Amino acid sequence: MMDIPAANQTSTPFQIWAGPSSFHTTPKHPGPLAGFQRLNLDSPSDQAPSGPPPGQTSPWSPYSCHPGACGSILTPPNINGPHSPPYTTGALPEFVPDAQEWSTTQQVGKQSPNSESRYGLDPELLPSAVNVMADDRAEWEGKVFVSEPFCPPPPLPTTSCVVEDRGSASPNAIRSTTYCLPHDGPTALLARLPLAALLAPLARQNPKEKPLPMCMEEVCVKGCHRCGASMCAAMSWQDCGQRFHCPFCGKLTEVPWQHYQPTDGVDGARLDRQQRPELHMGSYEVLHAHQGEAAALLLAIDVSAPALRGGHLEFVTEQIHALLASLLREEGGASWSDARVGLLTYDSRVQLYDLSPALSRPHMLVLAETEEEMQLPAREGLLVPLKASIHTIASVLQLIPQFSPERVESAGVPVDLPVKAGLAVMQTLACPGKLLVFHASPLVETGRAQTSSGFFGTSKAKSIFQPPEEAVTLAKACVRQGCGVHLFLLSQQHVGGAWPGHVPYLTGGALYTFNHLQGDLDRERFSSDLRRVARADVAYRAELSLFVSKGLRASGCYGLFVPGPSPSQVAMATLDWQTTLAVELAHGGALDETRGAAIQAVLTYSTREGGRRSRVHTLMLRCSRHLQDTFRQCQAQTLLSFYCKKMYCAVLERPLQELREELQTDLTEALASYRKHGSSASVSAGQLVLPQGLRALPVYVNSLRKSEVLLPGLRTSSVHQRLQQRCEVLRLDASASATHFYPLLLPLPPSVLEGALRCSGASLRPDGVYLLHAPHTLLLWVGARVPAGTLTELFNAGCFSLLHSGETKLPILDNPLSAGVRALIHTLGSEAPCTRELLLVKQGDACEELLQRHLVEDKSPNGGASYADFLYHLHVTSVRLLQ
């Protein structure tokens, strides 16, 4: 039930309804918006019909809402009213945002101009993503969700709960866009919703959950010999346990005599079912007998002339030494003590170091030829145990800032040089590992890209996102070796064709940028990111295999990896707990309603110690001939994460405007389909029908459409920012994706009674302080009329004028407000994928546009419709599709 006030007596009722529907008829429209004329919604130059005249109330507001069994029906304005947009027959409108820019002197706290609807709608009465999340948390927060075959939809990704595995994988590991699949392809086409699953094989468990069960490979019951699927609870047993039926290929497999057990006469389950996790658990792990080389930590430091002149090498080497020393102190066990560490430096040449404890002092090996494929001597001293060589490593780190610069300076040191050298070291010693590169030289422009933001408005924008062939080749070599690259860029530059993040992100690493490490805050962020990267527990040489029930197939796989020949097989150099992939499914035949459908993800990987393991997750879903069941069991946050990954991968091949139009088209057709197949004929044309689980989908999709990656007209976003945001968001899980596209806006001080607010300028009061949290952003907005006492308690400043917008750090003050806000920031930071800088934004400052970009219910300052206008147009177009 949506928390929306009741309508006044003059408006059409706003209600939730579930009624009979026909599931065997076809839509009246022949295909995706056939014959429809498209208007440009996002170009400020295009004109859109205005709302009611000033001072005149819209004849159709406000909305009202009533509970129902299956969905929501919103009553927006009369679509044939005097202010409805001019549609031609079969025309699909797109939004034309207001050309008015975000004013830095606007009166925040009243109805923000960017929050207003041109059609006179009250944005506060629209379905609220904040209320949807709050309702779900009230129902599930801290409670137990039983994950079993054919279970109902789980709690939302943004809700923390305890999952009890009773035969189906935790939603943290596998999450489906719907928990009731259509019976066959034609039925699925009617829904106009994607069938997909989000896979996070190494997802963290709630501390209150039981640890993942493990079994040895030799004693574990083997899976299907035909298709290679692992044993799971979806396998059905026949002939008293002598054979089992595989749901993924439909074949029967004989059970080896060593693993035979009879079945009971009740449900056909094996007698030892409860003693074997592979038979009754949705997730388990297999320990293989093979033992490989332990992973290494390899450090590559730029010692070129610009790096030596920068003055920050001494700080970098000190932080590296402090990190290595802390690894020994904090762990103290064999895991870190026996870990192998290596060190190399580079300018136009590469310097390797033999750090063998047997040597009286370390030896330097210089590689002058770096153009051709590097051939290194097989010397064990290139990677040494940390405990035995910590003092030798420390001596080299102390000398690095004292190096003499090259006599002849090169124009720039390519970033791929240390990557090739580090990869060669790991190949020579046959081990996987992490390669941390600390680069300070100017980036080398390749001349293949443009820096103009207008370039993104053309069909050539896809070339910006495409990695160079050399980067793809190097990334593939790193994947084969299990080498994850993390690049610390110490001198931040925006060179369009020289963005250095392709190889790091394609290998499971990341890019961290700093401004010459000049300030204390920049140095703190560097130290925090360095510790986070080195300590993170990841999987090396990861191979992900996907199996789906007979009648389904994987039609696409989207995420941050080097694409392979098949969407059901993905290889990655390294993989962490948050990295999530999206797999799109398609029907290849009809599903068996009695058996349901199964999705299995098997991740085979190496641990840091060199052990080989396989983690198996199997999700069992219902299937139905009734389309209403599919809509009823969808979740908006899962669909948002899928759409994001698919569209952000598609920018490599397709124009941005085409992708934005596709998002709107898909959502419009889905609403039209639900209106036809999930509602009764008594629903009036003035009522927007939304499935209950998709109430927040329009605001999520609108936020995705006007994100920095997809919106062509952003003037303040550089090429580097677009490229990095694409990669950062692609790897996020469903919970972080939802927070990225709909940030958490919290009033301060934190209050139990007042939770998150809607992401709109109308939520901000001039006498308030607000914290905006997204995975990669942390903003603190301060109103111009905040009481002086609050400013003193929080900032130790007596008046508003003494505050300075920009990067800041809250002072440690001895009062409840200061302690509470700092504790909240620390808690939110522990959930973030990287260390974030806290940005202070004062009301009225020019940098207030930073906040406006994240107020996703409002009009974007660079083009992009408000949530109210977007929802209105979705409704009008979906109704006209069925006329």
Image (cartoon, rainbow, N blue to C red):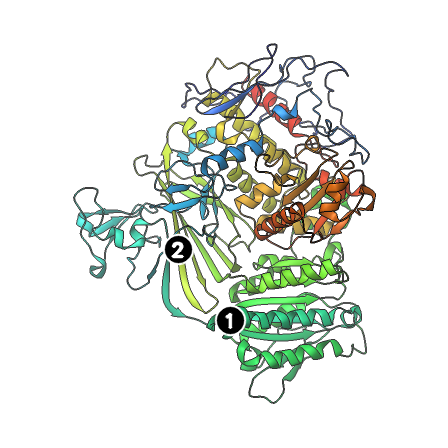
Residue 443, image x, y percentages: 75, 62
Q: Is any atom of residue 850 visible in this view?
A: no
Percent from the top left, x then y, of residue 471? 63, 60
Residue 81: horizontal and vertical position, in percent? 66, 12
Residue 276 numbered mark, or none: none
Residues packed near mark 2 inside 10 Å, few (<14), some (14 to 19) or many (20 plus): few
Q: Residue drawn at (42%, 44%), measured in percent from left and top?
A: 553
Q: Is residue 427 above or below residue 273?
A: below
Where is residue 498, by image quadrant?
A: bottom right
Left or right of residue 27, residue 765 in this image:
right
- The residue carrying mark 2 is 211
> What is the three-letter code of the residue carrying label 2?
Pro
For this orientation, the residue located farthest to the bottom is 360
Quarter where residue 344 is shown: bottom right
In the depicted view, which residue is nearer to us: 158 or 479? 158
Camera sees residue 557? yes
CA–CA distance between discs 2 and 1? 22 Å
Q: Is residue 51 above or below residue 375?
A: above
What label does residue 336 carry, if any?
1
> Which residue is depicted at the point 56% across and 43% down?
646
* Whole-percent x, y for residue 787 in the image: 75, 38
